[in-house]
Image: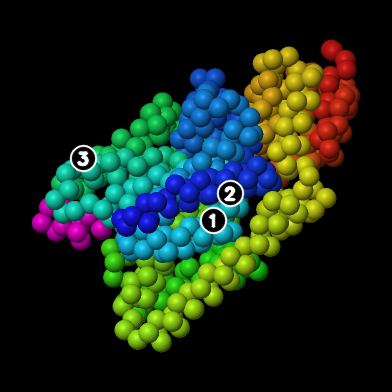
Amino acid sequence: MPRTCKLLFVPIFLLQAGFFLFVSQHRFIDGDEGFYLLASRLVMQHKAPYLDFFYTQAPLLPYAYAAWFRLAGISWFAARAFCALQTAVLGGLLYEHVCRETGKWIAGVAAVVLFASSSFIFAWFPIVKTFPLATLFLFLAYVIFVRQSQSAPGWWIAAAGVLFGLSVDTRSYVVAVAPVFLWWLFCQNRQRWLPRILWFAGGSVVGIIPSLILFFASPDAFLFNNLGYHAMRSKAGLIGLWEDKVMVLLATFGGRFTGFQFSVLTLTCFGFIVLRRMKRDASLLAFWIAFALGVVSSLPTPASMQYFCMLVPFLIVAAVCSASDYLAGLQSQREMRIAAAVCVILLVSFVGFAVPTYRHYLFTGENVPGIEDSIDAPNWTLQQVTAVSHAIDEFASPGEKVVSFWPGYIFASRADAYPGFENDFGLVVARKLSREKREQYHVPSSAEIVDEFASHGPRLVVIGNQGPVSGGPKYSSAVGVVRTYGYALVRMVGETSIYERSSTP
């Protein structure tokens, strides 16, 4: 890698770290962060996903965050700072990789500008979701694949397999990328493809050990949390609602702001593929990884634009490396100036389209998933949710089990979640499960929740404007229920209410 690229690495990494840290502390909270963070705290308390509480994703994320919280303490600041660190590390790897492939520092800088200004990145990576950690592991596996030689030792390929397995262990559908890696191993060395594939498979098995342990502990619970729940939460099953998927794809490519950015990256890559200008191994492999991720990201029901954020780093590599190769191959100075001008215009336009989205996700809340309108936005700030947690601590004893219809309020408090309230998505499928299965999966029904209030089980109840989620009682009816059974309002923090049992049986 050229000396200039090496000299710029540290300042570029620090700039990214500062930028993503700022974003992480100001980006409105996403509703899913509540159950991810409470799951991480439960893991710190030696509880296991699926076995001790309802958890609807692959298991690695709460273990990773639990380890981080032991170092940094339990707080929303620490959680989001960890997200920013993961994103900055990924951006640093992206810069180093592009510089190494192209030999040009300006290509690396362009890649970082695209990365940091991508609405899919700053909206979905510096928050507590599976995307940054899963993408970081997958990108590291990709880098190892690209840099291995035909004589690379088996342990080097196994290391890539471990990283790939860890990515799958964070977001399970990443397993769809496995055929791309296997095909790549076969094409790179058709004489010794079998040993290399076995090394990769062995490493992948090591990477998914957390999933294997939990699977063998309770296959039924593991499969329900990872597959059964997702197949039951909509009438269309695990994969369906194709009309909805088409609309999401159209929005992904034609959305008001993110559509331009995603279309530029995708169409640039397809253009170089069609023109046969994408010849570099790094570009080709990155493109096919992005393609596999794009296909599998469009399958879950219900569909969501945010799933496509994992494609962006790989599309950036493919687009920037191919564009650099194309410019280097031009013979005419006039053609080179025109092509360079087009690249600059696209880059500036790409950044320009990020500005409105940046304002929405950090300041106004407009068009942000999970936020109803600008009036609702203040309820989803880190400061507001932390204030609710502090208010809970004023009324609850340390370790007291408190009902909160959104687990994010419990995460940074000293209270514990009331059994069955570790995750706010169970009500969606509770009515479809038998009583035995609900007990096994730690998913209470609406009727069982009402029974808990009627029997005066919990002393404190927290009802925010956020919940309960669709499938359970709405905010107003939840308030009506707790008041009916003798709970009195003791504190309002914004639009979040804390009720205390005012009488005993």
Q: Give the label on residue 116, or none.
A: 1
Q: Residue at x 49, y 78 (%)?
A: 342
Pick the quarter of the image with the N terminus. Answer: bottom left
- Which callout, 3 or 2, points at the residue further toward the start of the chain? 2
Mark nearer the N terminus (1 vs 2) = 2
Three-letter amino acid code at disc 2?
Answer: Phe
In this picture, which residue range is highlighted in magenta? Answer: 182-193
Q: Residue 178, image x and y in percent? A: 33, 52
Q: Which of 353 and 336 is in front in this view?
A: 336
The percent coordinates of residue 503 (x first, y second) are 88, 15
Relative side of 344 to 158, left or right: right
Three-letter amino acid code of the residue under disc 3: Trp
Does the image show residue 438? no
Distance between mark 1 and mark 2 Cα atoms: 8 Å
Q: Where is 193 relative to 276, above or below?
A: above
For the residues marked 3 and 2, what is the alpha-carbon distance in whole angstroms?
36 Å
Q: Is mark 2 on a helix, strand or loop?
A: helix
Asked if 112 appears above or below 425 in the picture, the reply is below
Q: Label 2, on which residue?
A: 19
Q: Residues within 10 Å of mark 2 (few under 14, many from 20)?
A: some
Amino acid at circle 1: Ala
Residue 282 visible within the image: yes
Residue, x 67% and y 32% (percent of image)? Answer: 407
Toward the left, the furthest residue is 191
Decide whether the magenta segment is chiefly helix, strand or loop: helix
Q: Do the residues labelled 1 and 2 touch (CB within 8 Å)?
A: yes
Which disc, if any, is residue 155? 3
> Label 1: how many residues lie within 10 Å, few (<14), some (14-19) or many (20+)?
some
- The quadrant holding residue 100 is bottom left
Tell me the crowding category of disc 3: few under 14, some 14 to 19, or many 20 or more residues within 10 angstroms, Cα based.
Answer: some
Please say if 255 is above or below 341.
above
